Image: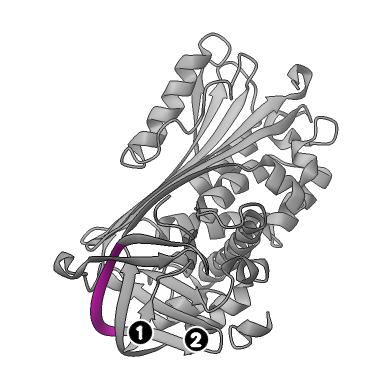
Amino acid sequence: MTSLRNFKSLMAPLILLAIFAGVSGLSAQSGTANRNDLYAVVEANNQFAIDLYRKINAQDAGKNIFVSPFSVSTALAMTFEGSSGNTRKQMAGVLHLYMSDADRQTGFSALLTETSAGPGKHYKLNVANALWGQKGYHFEAPFVSATDKYYGGTLKSVDFAGNTEGARVEINTWVEDHTAKMIRDLIPRGALDTDTPLVLTNAIYFKGTWASQFKPLFTKDAPFNVSKTVKVQTPMMHQTGHFRFIKEDGVEAIELPYEDDDLSMIAILPDGDIDKMGAGLSLDQIKQLCVDMFSQDVDVILPRFKMEAGYSMGPMLSGMGMPDAFSVKLADFSGMSGRPNLYIGKVIHKARIEVNEEGSEAAAATGVVMVEKAMMRDKAVFRADRPFLFIIVHNPTGAILFMGRLSNPSL
């Protein structure tokens, strides 16, 4: 990544974003220990976010990318609560959860509290978790208690065995209700069967208006350079204002805050191939860009776009270092049922975003489908007129909530 020489160390825990937002940390009632646990979990989640983006980048060259790594890591963290043995070690490595059980649980609990929009905010940010268990199936009390207490993941009784389609519809309706109908049919037909014992779900929804909105009058169709040889016409929004911005050798980056300054979009525009940038992307690089940005007058040209994506993440997560969790023979989730009789059959993720003159609306959901082994089956100018990476960050915690790449706004 010589062309990104100064795109050196990209975010030194994303906590730095919170510092730049002028945030001192958690609210006064949160103690130092809770704050440290929260930041440890944020650092772990953000590192997982970069790892996941690089994995998708490798398999989806030239395509649009949009994902909520926050949603995926939260759903997997709840699943982690029921893991044991080597399965647990592998999941800890992929999720970067190198901390005690107490620190992890306290950290996630604090993070989920912090990322809920409180009263008086001009944006919406909702995160919800739920477990869906076969009625009459035995789940270990510590697992059920931990997912409920620290993640708000209440265990809901459904009848996969007697009414599989009814259970699927109930789960999907819950997801729709918690994402303002943006995510529909998270669990597709055929993903569940009469022997499904458990599904773990996370849903996240965000809607915010820009602190400095674009005027529709200034939005004009203009070329977006998909590649050196391919251009497409797309609506390009325009405004001039005071923003945190940096132009270094090989890369430009800008912070576009939403109202209340609790959340921002960070847009990162490389001079060269965005696939190559993604291949070498690191959390330290993003952190350093955020450190290097400073307030100045900037002429901002940004495409208006919509994007939705869906991923079956089992193969990706297995390839990232947790294959045992998906193995009929090797998976150990005895913390869930008291026996090592469950493995992860599917990790399903869907995400949508719309960026326009007023602001952004984004939602995502993740479903982890457990399978029972016995039932196994087979002025400065920031002109984003070429592919760019974007991240939506919760500034008070520094948590990466959404992450994507716009390669072609016409898709």
- 305 vs 164, left or right, is left
Magenta region: 235-242
Upstream in sequence: badge 2 or badge 1: 2
**Residue at image location 61% in from the left, 13% down from the top:** 194
- Relative image position of residue 217 (x, y in whole percent): 14, 67
- Relative image position of residue 183 (x, y in whole percent): 40, 39
95 is higher (above) or lower (below) than 391: above
Task: Tell me where residue 297 sits by quadrant.
Answer: bottom left
- 118 vs 382, left or right, is left
**Residue at image location 40% in from the left, 70% down from the top:** 385
Residue 68 within the segment the image draws in magenta: no
- The answer, for residue 10, to whether it is visible in the render is no
Q: Residue most toward the top?
A: 162
Task: Please give the label number shown on residue 88.
Answer: none
* Mark 1, residue position: 381
- 178 vs 340, left or right, is left
Q: Residues within 10 Å of mark 1 (few under 14, many from 20)?
A: some
288 is higher (above) or lower (below) than 376: below
* Residue type for callout 1: Val
* Residue type for callout 2: Val
* Mark 2, residue position: 291
Task: Tell me where residue 92 sits by quadrant.
Answer: bottom right
